[in-house]
Image (spheres, helix red, strand yellow):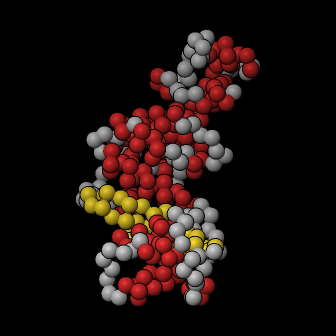
Amino acid sequence: MARAVMRPLGRGDRMQKKWLDGRPTREIAESFIKPNDRLTSFARLEIYNRQYWFRIRDCFYEDYPGLRAILGDQKFERLADEYLSKYPSQSYTLRNLGSRLVQFLRAAPRWTAPKTRLALDLARLEWAHIEAFDNEARPSLSTRHLAGAAAKIRLKLQPHLTLLKLENEVDDFLIELKKNSGLRNEASNAMEQNQRRKKTRVTRGLKRKINFLAVHRYEDGIYYKRLEPGQFVLLSALQAGATLERACARLAGLKISGDPGETVGQWFAHWSALGWFCGWEQ
């Protein structure tokens, strides 16, 4: 049943008429679904097959407005079907649909060419947005907890915090798109939405420039915070498990404004106020 329901649709978004081994799908449907006075076994199974695909397409469509905007609706929908066929849903929650999208795009750049680098930036940012929205938030450490901390400790960062090095300034672009993006449609509306999409308008002014970003949740809101190179290096080292001492040593040779010690201290005070630190270990 699961294999039949999750199998990709055929032409015209209808259930495929041939089964995996070449037999008519009608025979497979008749082996485990009874007909009724209105529908054949095939027709009853097709309802589930179509609604499954319309629903996950709909969710994928709503999760990646930025990627959809730069590729265009038709190319994006072809990419979505290919991705969802290769990586079908294996989770109880639809929020995990795009968990392997970046991996997929890197392995098959033909689906996003000639905008592959821009597409990767947007896919990474949009997945970070999903992570920030509903990943775990642990009790945070304050500056009082950090005062006098030993250099050998390992600071832990919040699970909902994602650090990104991007080649394009896509944060403002995505914010603008999301302002006009509604909530996901309910499953009952999936078929109608699948057949009629609103045209996506691409915002002009995307700049190609290396930039660093922290995507995080604060007081139930999602924020994109630009980082200086030194901040990104330091936080990335901490997130990778480096001790406080080793993480700070990574700043050697980087340009830091003002007095380095005072500046880094201000960074930690600010990050602590945002609740980014959630524990430590010796």
> Is residue 47 visible to us here?
no
Point 54% across, 58% down: residue: 131
- What count of labels does the image hold? 0
Q: Position of residue 97 (x, y in %)?
A: 55, 45
When asked about the image quadrant of residue 107, the answer is top left
In this rendering, the answer to whether 180 lies above or below 138 is above
Q: Position of residue 128 (x, y in %)?
A: 48, 58
Q: Quadrant of the C terminus?
A: bottom right
- For the residue pair 138 and 279, the one nearer the viewer reads as 279
Q: Position of residue 274 (x, y in %)?
A: 52, 77
Q: Position of residue 265 (x, y in %)?
A: 45, 85
Point 55% across, 20% down: residue: 16
Point 41% across, 86% down: residue: 261
When asked about the image quadrant of residue 21, the answer is top right
Q: Is residue 217 left or right of residue 202?
A: right
- For the residue pair 138 and 28, the one nearer the viewer reads as 138
